[in-house]
Image: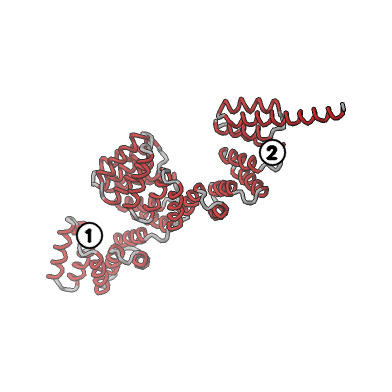
Amino acid sequence: MLRNFAIVVGVWTALGARAALADASQDCASFRGDAAIAACDGAIREFPEDAQAFFRRGGAYFGKGDSERAIADYTKAIEIDESFAKAYAARGVAFKAKGEVDRAIADYTRAIELVPDYAYAYAHRANAYEHKPDLDRAVADYTKALEIDPKYAFALANRGVVYSDLRQFDLALADYDKAIELVPNDAPLHYNRGNVHMDRREVDLAIADFTTALELDPKHPFAHNNRANAYQAKGDFDLALADYDKSIEINPRGAFAYNGRGNVYKAKGDLDRAIVAYGEAIAIDPRYASALHNRAVAYGEKSKFDDAIADETAAIAINPKFAEAYSMRGNDFAGKSDYDRASADFSKAIELDPNRPGPYNARCWVNVLRDRDLKQALADCAAAVRLAPSKADGLYSRGFVKLRLGQLDAATEDFDAALKCDPRQADALYGRGLAKRRQGDAAGAQADFAAATANRAGVAGYYTRHGIE
């Protein structure tokens, strides 16, 4: 009888312990922040082998931004229960927050080994791969997460980001569309879809998405900035300036908005205000290579070539692979008649980006001006024409090479082709006039000279100064 009683008492004691553990664990789970930490502390004191309490306290620490303590608690939870997949996944998130991406990937991988259909672990491992960056693996993991859970908005949204980075804009747009169907009131989703529409040159659709993002989050500075970019692309400069101003009001340290405002002023022909705006961007971020480059372009248009060269040189020091900066610095050196340094910069621009026609045409033109290396000039102009067959620049430059070589009929053909692309192109008109004069067609030459001068005053003086008559 006593034995039976003892057994009954033992059973009730175990049940009571489990109930107390459940109550303590529930208290630990019911709170947030410091209250959760205090409740979990109590649970752990009573039940030092409660993996859930360590896991939950780790979550509370992570919510406070204390990744180190979070990792320690997740590790303790794993020591108690080596099959605790959620603890591995949570520790992976904490490792990634610390920038320890490889350790994060290892933890997500272990969570997947324990729970093969763990969509959360696949999606967050994808996010870690995205930051390495290993974009192909990121896509594969996001796709696996979506096979497990087709309505996983996080995976859709982030796969959309990766597709956009891979410039697979159709796939990115499809993912954002599905994500927005699931979470229609998410401002970042509309913002990101707007960026894809901009990449697809669907400016009005981009503006609509940026506007929706701002309705959902009126203080989203990037949405104001990017909507301003879209308005600028449409030529709606006043609306663009209003959005850049609003972006600056929300985030006065946002250098990108000052740079954008400079671009609008430059497009409006107000170079002085553009230079000031670029200077404000550079003051905030002295390593903002694009702002330095943009200010250099504005200086170049004002023929302040030394200032332009200084800015492009600074931009190149920040980004040695900035092909456009080399190309524009080459133009500035050419503006100072320093053709050797101009040619060297155009060559570097071509080396960095061999698929852009501008530097080929510019290097061709430098050789036209100094009447040197005309065989190389012909090859460069041919490359420019091949890369941009519908643009007049390469055609009329090649026409001047042939003019230098005395190939008057061939030169006239190139000038004619350039004028089909742009009937008001002053250089092509003037060059054709020179060819006609050399061929004895004085009236035709005079008509072309007059048309060229009407389209650009001073064109004759430019060519006379360079000995092209």
Seen at 23% across and 62% down, the residue is: 427
- Give the percent coordinates (x, y) of residue 32: 55, 30
Instruction: List x then y, in percent, for residue 350.
Output: 41, 58
Q: Please state which amino acid type lies under the numbered disc 1.
A: Tyr
Q: Residue furthest front?
A: 1
User: Which residue is depicted at the point 32% across and 67% down?
Assistant: 389
Image-quadrant location for residue 225: top left
Helix, strand or loop at disc 2? helix
Q: Which quadrant would the N terminus be assigned to in this image?
A: top right
- Please report the residue visible at 13 percent of the width from the left and 66 percent of the height from the top: 447
- 333, above or below 81, in the image: below
Residue 202 location in percent, x, y?
34, 55
Mark 1 and mark 2 lie on one chain; the one further toward the N terminus is 2
Residue 463 is marked as: 1
In front of the other: 110 or 273: 110
Q: Tell me if 226 is positioned left or right of 433 in this view.
A: right
Determine crowd level at label 2: few under 14, some 14-19, many 20+ residues with C-alpha closer than 10 A.
many
The one nearer the camera, 253 or 298, is 253
Estimate the x, y position of residue 182 in percent, counting from the top left. 46, 48
Under mark 2, the amino acid is Ile
Contact, mark 1 vs mark 2 (Cβ under 8 Å): no
Along the viewing direction, whichever of 164 and 50 lies nearer the viewer: 50
Q: Is residue 134 visible?
A: no
Decide if residue 203 is on the left or right side of residue 99: left
Residue indicated by mark 2: 78
Q: Residues within 10 Å of mark 1 (few under 14, many from 20)?
A: some
Give the mark toward the camera: 1 or 2: 2
In depth, the one of 348 and 155 nearer the eye is 155
Q: CA distance from mark 1 to mark 2?
A: 79 Å
Q: Secondary structure at mark 1?
A: helix
